[in-house]
Image (tube, grey):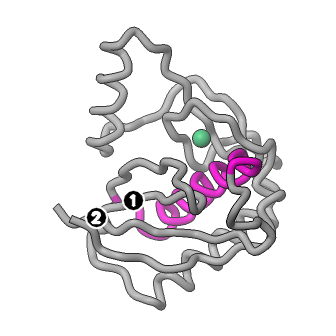
Amino acid sequence: MVRWPLIMDFFYIERGNMKANQKLNHTGAHLLAAAVMKLYPDTILGIGPSIDEGFYYDFKFANPINDQDIKKIEKQMKKLVSGGYKMELVKTSDDSKQPYKLELSKELKAKGETLTYYGMINPSNGESIFTDLCAGPHVDSVAKLKNFKLLHFSAAY
Ligand SMILES: [Zn+2]
């Protein structure tokens, strides 16, 4: 299966000190996934772990994406940032179309872990526009993610 990881960079974060900014980086992963799902609802979500350089999130797009798509995704992310969406615990998530999330949920449950879900909440109506299986932690609002750029994407096998 071909996946398309997207890697993002925050301008104001020193590369050598990513650990101090884990909350910010990790919230960025939610922001990225929310934007991707808004624009390409048929995308299969992988996982979005932290890495030394920040984080990545891998996606299986229905069609391969190009530089124009990257620009679109970035624009959508900035829109969400200016919308002041909040990161809050929610009860559950509909992962019926997300095989990797279902698999992960099963594994965690088998280990006896409690599943937690975080939503990206629209402050004007209290609804989550994107919910992800996640243990946190996050910054309280995506409004804190101001100066970022999607660096690049690459196909991985
Ligand atoms: Zn999270």
Pick the front one: 17 or 123: 17
Q: Secondary structure at mark 1?
A: strand
- Is there a contact, CB below 8 Å, between mark 1 and mark 2? yes
Residue for point 56% across, 56% down:
52
Q: Secondary structure at mark 2?
A: loop
Query: Which quarter of the rendered image does ligand 1 occupy?
Result: top right
Q: Amino acid at mark 1?
A: Asp
29 within the magenta span: yes
Find disc 2 in the rendering and name its residue. Answer: 3
Q: Which residues are magenta?
A: 19-43
Image location (x, y in percent) of residue 133: 49, 34
10 Å crowding of disc 1: few (<14), some (14-19), many (20+)? many
The quadrant of the image that shows the N terminus is bottom left
10 Å crowding of disc 2: few (<14), some (14-19), many (20+)? some
Instruction: Please indicate whether residue 23 sits to the left or right of residue 31 in the image.
Output: right
Q: Residue furthest left?
A: 1
Residue for point 29% across, 74% down:
155
Q: Residue furthest top?
A: 112
Q: Is residue 113 above or below residue 10?
A: above
Residue 58: image tag:
1
